[in-house]
Image: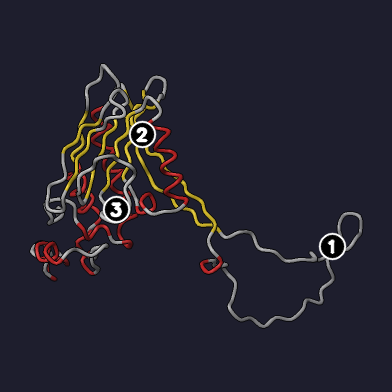
Amino acid sequence: MPSPFPGMNPYLEQEDVWHDFHERFITTAAEPIAAQVDPNDIVKIDEHVFVHELPASERHFLGRADVAVTRPSRRLKPLDARGNRVMDAPVEAYLPAVNVDRFAFLEIRDRRNRQLVTVIELLSPANKRAGSNRDQYLAKRQQVINSTAHLVEIDLLRDGKRPPIETLPTCHYCIMISRAEMRPRAEVWPLKLRERLPLIPIPLRPPDPDVTLDVQEVLHQVYDRARYQSYVYDGVPEPSLSEDDSDWARQFLPTPMEKLA
């Protein structure tokens, strides 16, 4: 069953849903693109890995009880190969607690030499919130822009600060294509909540023509395969919709019986 919304489904923007949607979207989009670029190019799924230290208030040590009663061990320490007793460490320390975020993206590469042709990104909240994850993403984004590869950037999140695009009209969602031969100019699709997601070109290297990606169709396939209808409507869109948009969106919400179908 496809998503009931004509365009982006705002219920997919919930924190509880988004990462799953992101990963499924990337793998689903890879299939039609790979079929079109074959045999000259290949499509590979890669991932950004963001590692950052957690603040003390968010650190958790697995297997460590909040309260415990212990008795000092009276067992003798084992002997090493030379017959010496193993000494206790004089100090107990903890390694820094870190959080690792992983976000998939697509690469189109030349089949013969594996040179990078196009990068396709679906933005995540971490890309749009101030912090080390955004800084790292923007640095990698700039590397692509400075290279001979094309960049396709799909933003289906209303919240957060978009990566820099000059003179972008007010919109809920945005798709940007930066062709290597056109830089610094870029093609931009500013999108409203009530609009259908577009069929976009995916640029390749000459003489190969563009292939296409139907973003709306990919969303419908992901929505159906993940069975989002059964649980995403238990929550609310994040961020919340305006009163007018909320009234408009209500017509698309499934009934309780439809959720179970």
* The furthest residue to the front: 167
Q: Is residue 137 above or below residue 54?
A: above
To which quarter of the image does residue 3 belong? bottom left
Which comes before the other along the chain, label 3 or label 1?
A: 3
* Quadrant of the image occupied by residue 236: bottom left
Earlier in the chain: of badge 2 and badge 1, it is 1
Residue 123, how many percent across, how many down? 32, 47
Q: Secondary structure at mark 1?
A: loop
Helix, strand or loop at disc 3?
helix
For residue 21, the mark is 3
Q: CA distance from mark 3 to mark 2?
A: 19 Å
Query: In the image, what residue type sits under mark 2?
Result: Glu
Q: Quadrant of the C terminus?
A: bottom left
Give the residue pinned by disc 2.
107
Residue most extreme to the top = 207
Residue 38 visible in the picture: no
Q: Nearer the viewer, residue 217 or 120?
A: 120
As displayed, is residue 5 above or below residue 260?
above
- Mark 2 or 1, which is nearer the eye? 2
Quadrant including the N terminus? bottom left
Name the one closer to the observer, 54 or 108: 54
Residue ID for mark 1: 86
Spot occupied by residue 242 in the image (x, y as percentages of width and height): 17, 64
| Residue at x-position 22% and y-position 37% | 188
Amino acid beneath label 1: Val
Extreme residue toward the bottom, this view = 69
**How far from the left and from the top, in percent, is residue 102?**
43, 49
Relative placement, left or right, of 232 versus 19 is left
Q: Nearer the viewer, mark 3 or mark 1?
A: 3
What's the colour scheme?
A: secondary structure
